[in-house]
Amino acid sequence: TVAAHQLRTPLSAVGWALQGLQKEPFNDSQKVLVNTGLAASNNLLKIVEDLLNVSKIEEGKFGYNFKKIDLVQFLQSALDQASPVAKEYQVKIYMEPSKEESINLDADPDKLILAVSNLLENAIKYNVPSGQVVVSIERLAEPFVQVNIKDTGVGIPQEAMDKLFTKFFRAANVMSKETEGSGLGLYIVKNIVRRHGGQVWAESEVGRGTTFHLVLPTDSRLIPQREIADQF
């Protein structure tokens, strides 16, 4: 925690400096150097943020602010935010039309967007060129709703499934495709969904893609009353 806090400020300063350099009239090779440095700085800052988030989760101090949200609009906004990354990786991303125009539930939008964005980013980065990511919503028996995030990517080996939501774990086939990453994203996702009174799991086949399922309650009485420290 201390190391992550000490790293965050100078890394942010490096990022701001490189963003400023992007506006300078450099030649093509100089622009490549600046853009490469900025991308590396952003990736490292994300790892530091993941470490800080995990330390707060383990202490039971991540902090949640629940309010009413429309899940349909919320997911569409998450897809809009993920679109630039999908375009970069040549992946089509869209949401299947929902049978309901709106689904209201209690959530912390800042924390839930962190979880959903993490799943969408994984689905995009570990996909194939011209692949796709499809998000769908379905009503379960009251009072639950299920969100599905399905991709056409590399898939997850069966022997890796049990470790999928543990800290620092990354499957071998994923590491060979995308070398950078902290292995903390799915651990954070699991804890955010659990704090919302929900569950998350995955189904996958190597070479055929992965589907992550999130089940969330629409009844606020099923949301835990307080945050619990996680030492697993």
Image (cartoon, rainbow, N blue to C red):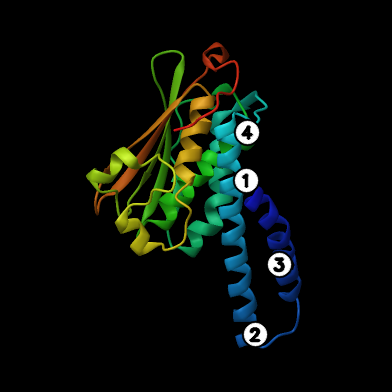
From the viewer's side, name the closer residue of 161 and 60: 60
User: Which one is closest to the eye, mark 1 or mark 2?
Assistant: 1
Element type at mark 4: loop
Q: Going by the image, does 1 lie left or right of 126?
A: right
Give the Cα distance between marks 3 and 1.
Answer: 20 Å
Q: Going by the image, does 77 lie left or right of 211?
A: right
Residue at (61, 73) in percent of width and height: 37
Give the Cα distance between marks 1 and 2.
Answer: 35 Å
Marks 3 and 4, the one that precedes in the sequence: 3
* Label drawn at residue 14: 3
Q: Residue furthest front?
A: 2
Residue at (62, 27) in percent of width and height: 69
User: Which one is closest to the eye, mark 3 or mark 1?
Assistant: 1
Give how far across and how far down residue 91 sits, in percent. Answer: 42, 58
Marks 1 and 4, the one that precedes in the sequence: 1
Give the Cα distance between marks 3 and 4.
Answer: 26 Å
Cβ atoms under marks 2 and 4 closer than 8 Å: no
**In the figure, 59 relative to 182: above or below?**
above
Residue at (51, 39) in percent of width and height: 188
Q: Which residue is tagged 1?
A: 1
Q: Residue flagged by tag 3: what amino acid is it?
A: Val
User: Which one is closest to the eye, mark 2 or mark 3?
Assistant: 3
Q: Which residue is tagged 4?
A: 62
* Disc 3 packing (10 Å; few <14; some 14–19; many ≥20): some
Give how far across and how far down residue 44 sits, in percent. Answer: 58, 60
Marks 3 and 1, the one that precedes in the sequence: 1
Report the number of discs. 4
* Label drawn at residue 30: 2
Give how far across and how far down residue 166 sits, in percent. Answer: 40, 40
